[in-house]
Image (cartoon, coloured by chain):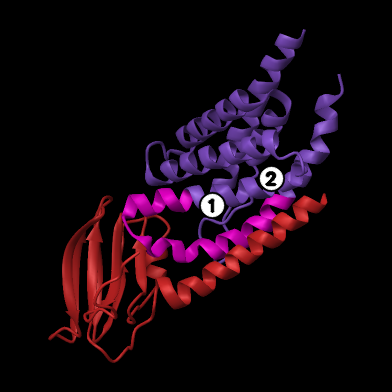
Amino acid sequence: MKKADWFLVISIALLALIFTAFNKHVFFRAGDVTQETKAVIKVQGEKIKEMSLPLKEKHYKLEVQGKEGIAVIEFQDKQVRMYESPCAEQICVQRSWISSPGESIICVPNEIVVEIESAKQPYDAVTY
Amino acid sequence: MYKTRKLIEIAMFVTLGTVLHVMEATVPNPLPLPGAKLGLANIVTLLALIRYGFKTSIAVALMRVLFGSLLSGTFLSPSFMLSLSGAFVSTGIMNILYYFVPAFSVIGISIIGAAAHNMGQLMAASLLVQTKGIFYYLPFLLIFSLPAGFSTGLITKLLLPYLQRE
């Protein structure tokens, strides 16, 4: 390994650290859990449903047609999880319950995304 | 003589790459990181790059992904898109480094290739599912790409003298 290689290793490790910090504080700002939240369900990039949490029913199961087949999304109180999915690796099911704003369940094979957003936006507007 | 040798070597690279690609997909992943793997197929791309340059390395990478996906039955599926974009981005970046930044050794180029592969895959995945949430995963993959890139780079470095012996 040359000197430049070590430099590269250190800069990639630093980049990963910066990304982690950035994720935590800026990109996926975890909002206050007690405030109003909503679950946004996207299939193949299109927003198909928005549910304000908590729902009126204590338990609720929603069937969603994904790219590979029908997935079942379960709601309980303020939590959401992928209950059943036709995909091979079942990563989305193992992700289990999510409840705070910024968390998400992403199923790549079935192209379904469930994201929790806070109903109130933390900012009025963002300019670049 | 040179032409025949080149033909045979490229055929060998594509075959080896395909086998490694399929093998890696069937070995269960012991880590809690879905999608994290050594990227052994990157060895042949890197060998093709060092031996025969830009065009050959791109051709070997693309053919490897194509045949590998046909054999494992994932042709045109999301995982095929991810491998394709990952292979494309990493081969491109490795070429740029190899030709324009002579300060890096084979191992450094391999590490950058592994990191670029992950970035390319995540970019494709985020386009596919239309969410930025997937980039939350990037730091974990970047850290993992260091040992993965190092080991494939080391294997390439050890293999090169055997190929260069005429």
- Magenta region, main secondary structure: helix
| Vertical comparison of B79 with B45: above or below | below
Residue B118: which numbered mark, if any? 1
**Image point 20% across, 85% down: which residue?**
A54
Answer above or below: position of B84 versus A32: above
Residue A123 percent coordinates (x, y)? 28, 78
Local packing at callout 1 (Cα closer than 10 Å; few below 14, some 14-19, many 20+) is: many
Q: Which chain identifier belongs to the purple chain?
A: B
Indicate the colour of chain A.
red
**Residue ID at (69%, 45%):** B110
**Kind of residue at disc 1:** Asn
Residues beneath discs 1 and 2 located on the same chain: yes
Quadrant in which residue B46 is drawn: top right
Using residue B142 as the reference point, say whether residue B47 is left or right of it: right
Residue B66 place in picture, x, y as percent = 48, 31
Q: Which residue is mark 2?
A: B110
Q: Residues within 10 Å of mark 2 (few under 14, many from 20)?
A: many
Q: Magenta includes A72?
A: no
Residues in magenta, as a range: B121-150
* Residue at 58% in and 37% down: B91
Report the side of B68 relative to B144 (left or right). left
Establish if A71 lies above or below B43: below
